[in-house]
Image (tube, helix red, strand yellow):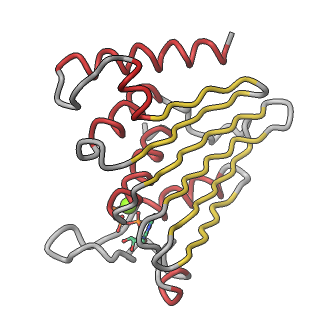
């Protein structure tokens, strides 16, 4: 089953592909308010105004055609949001950045589970080229939240290089602890 974490990874990959230097991923769960909101904001190359209305189409992609010739990430997430009583909104300032806001009903039976967020946050940090992207990754459940900034976190964990074999284990265990702290 495709989890929300899988969607988040794909959508954040769009920001990486757009050569963003700063990418913020924010997940806000509000259980009393029955909302599940995911925001992904970047300062990448943005989307041309004439392309903006097409990005939700299954076949729209600006990826080089030597690769797969469909663009699925946004259309899959859009379908998921609509099934879950919500919507996907994308705003872009060409050459300056893109902001994606998705909403779903928290208690909707069709809403996919969040999945393994620590693994996805860890992969995002480690998959970007050495220190090239500044990530801000945050998760809030009601009034509790945590935030990870990759550079500060790497220093805090004394990880000198992204290829350090200990990097993955240390990041995973830190993020898992932060997840526990907002759920207790
Ligand atoms: N953050 C972004 N910055 C700039 N362009 C974007 C961004 N997100 C999406 N796009 C544009 O929208 C198109 C469609 O995105 P979508 O994720 O649906 O498909 P894709 O990334 O092309 O392919 P796939 O997700 O299947 O690997 C992209 O090809 C790109 O042109
Ligand atoms: Mg994509």
Furthest residue toward left: 66
Q: Is residue 178 above or below residue 8?
A: above
Q: Total number of numbered labels?
A: 0
Furthest residue toward bottom: 50
- x and y percentages locating residue 151 in the rendered image: 39, 34
Q: Is residue 120 above or below residue 93?
A: above
User: 10 or 143: nearer the eye?
Assistant: 143
Residue at 36%, 17% in the rendered image: 157
- x and y percentages locating residue 5 in the rendered image: 47, 38
Residue at 17%, 29% in the rendered image: 163
Q: Is residue 56 above or below residue 88?
A: below
User: 73 or 178: nearer the eye?
Assistant: 178
- x and y percentages locating residue 173 in the rendered image: 40, 13
Residue at 34%, 63% in the rendered image: 19
Give the image quarter of residue 99.
Answer: bottom right
Q: Quadrant of ligand 2?
A: bottom left
Is 81 left, or right, of 4 in this rendering? right
Is 46 left, or right, of 163 in this rendering? right
For the N terminus, give its image quadrant: top left
User: 93 or 9: nearer the eye?
Assistant: 93
- x and y percentages locating residue 81 in the rendered image: 63, 54
User: 59 or 181: nearer the eye?
Assistant: 181
Residue at 69%, 41% in the rendered image: 36
For the C terminus, give its image quadrant: top right
């Amino acid at each position: 089953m495709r989890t929300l974490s899988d969607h988040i990874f794909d959508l954040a990959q769009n920001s990486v592909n757009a050569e963003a230097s700063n990418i913020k991923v924010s997940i806000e769960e509000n259980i009393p308010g029955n909302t599940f909101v995911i925001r992904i904001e970047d300062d990448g190359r943005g989307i041309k105004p004439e392309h903006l209305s097409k990005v939700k189409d299954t076949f729209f992609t600006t990826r080089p055609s030597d690769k797969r010739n469909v663009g699925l990430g946004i259309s899959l997430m859009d379908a998921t949001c609509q099934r879950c009583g919500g919507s996907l909104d994308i705003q872009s300032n060409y050459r300056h950045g893109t902001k994606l806001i998705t909403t779903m009903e928290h208690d909707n039976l069709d809403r996919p589970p969040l999945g393994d967020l620590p693994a996805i946050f860890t992969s995002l940090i480690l998959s970007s080229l050495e220190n090239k992207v500044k990530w801000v990754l945050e998760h809030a459940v009601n009034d509790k939240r945590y935030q990870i900034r990759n550079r500060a976190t790497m220093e805090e964990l004394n990880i000198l290089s992204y290829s350090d074999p200990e990097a993955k284990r240390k990041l995973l265990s830190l993020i898992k602890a932060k997840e526990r702290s907002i759920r207790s």
